[in-house]
Image (cartoon, rainbow, N blue to C red):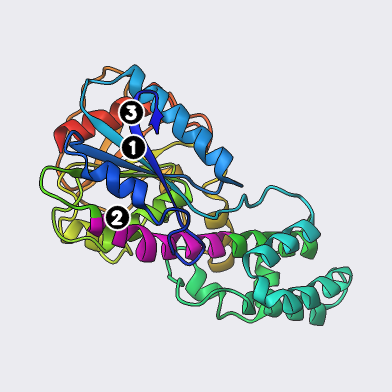
Amino acid sequence: MQLSGFPAAEVEFDRAGRPAGDGGAAVRALAADRATTDLVVLCHGWDDGPATARELYAALASSLREVSDGRPIALACVLWPSRRYAASTGLEARLDLLRTLRPEHAPTIDAAADLVPALPARATARTAFAAAVLSVAAPGSQDVEDASAQLLTLPGGTVMDRLAKPASGFVEAARQLLDYLTYYELKTRAGDVGERGLAPLLGAIARPGLRVHLAGHGFGARLVTEAAKARPTASLGTLTLLQAALSHHVFAADGTLREILDRHVVTGPILVTHTAYDLVAGVAFEIASRITGLDHGCLGRDGTRETAEAVTAELLPAGGSYTWRPGVPHDLLADRFVHGHTDVCGPEIAHALLSAIAAS
């Protein structure tokens, strides 16, 4: 398999992180080829199927070829069962999406759906609705950075009251709660695939002379960073987070990804693209802020926060010259070239990635 002339292979994981298809054999073979010095592992975000993911990989590969410096890189393309979220305006569609993410809890979600007509008028219905949908959330991924630790322990009525807006009321509050829960489920799934699926594969393909670089978009950033957390010191060349749906505090002193910096997992630069034009990545964090009254922003909108080592920079035109520092995040303001959440395949992104690889 090739993408724009680069050797490439796919690896597919199920929702629990178990390899599907060939079990990763194609990626193992690609990594074993001694002609490959740099393996770039690409991971999509909340796309709604493999076709969309493949389109992203093909577009990015085309840009990489456009700005290629001749380095013998290969591409490992991850496929995982993500879902598009916040794409519908209806409550029923959102409940259907939650059913697909948590099918074992369909009866509980059905009971919540029965309460929808009573949400505007009855406080007891609102409390019961929120309690029902919150009860289906997958355990183990709660943290304070995105308010999930608080949200999943608050009374249902309190959650609905905090999310309700004067003009739109409790139906809109229910929509926001379901959007947040979809975010949380995808966050959990991406983390499981990264930790249980991609991380063991990275361990299996490691060999002298091969540098591995991880690049994730949206929720794919969650997947690759969970894999990075499981890797030993100096085992990754670069880490690129494209419009990441992660908290802007993840690299702070008490952040969930701090150990990647402290253990020096990445030998080269860590790239973080961010832009105010990304109206998707920050949706769940805006909802979290409404629930807690605190600042919950995301990497894809803001870059890092409270991270002393972080380098403030800009995404440059293709051919621009970067000054990289090893092992630390580089906040690349991307307003000039990234004008939406999925606008991450241009030559400017490709050039930054190749420049970082050359410096690793």
Distance between the Cα atoms at labels 2 and 1? 33 Å
Disc 1 marks which residue? 75
- Residue at 18% of width from left, 43% of height from top? 211
Give the residues in magenta: 183-204
Give the amino acid type for the residue marked by disc 3 in the picture.
Phe
Residue at x 36%, y 36% (from the top left corner):
8
Q: Main secondary structure of the magenta part?
A: helix
Task: Report the front residue among 17 and 245.
Answer: 17
**Residue at horizontal 27 percent and vertical 62 percent from the top:** 229
Residue 121 locus on image (x, y percent): 88, 72
Q: Which residue is mark 3?
A: 6
Q: On the rendered image, what quadrant is the N terminus found in?
A: top left
Q: Is residue 201 above or below residue 119?
A: above
Reading the image, the residue beneath label 2 is 306
Circle 2 SS class: loop
Q: CA distance from mark 3 to mark 1?
A: 7 Å
Labels 3 and 1 touching (C-beta < 8 A): yes
Relative to 68, 123 lies left or right? right
Q: Position of residue 194 (x, y in %)?
A: 38, 59
Residue type pointed to by label 2: Glu
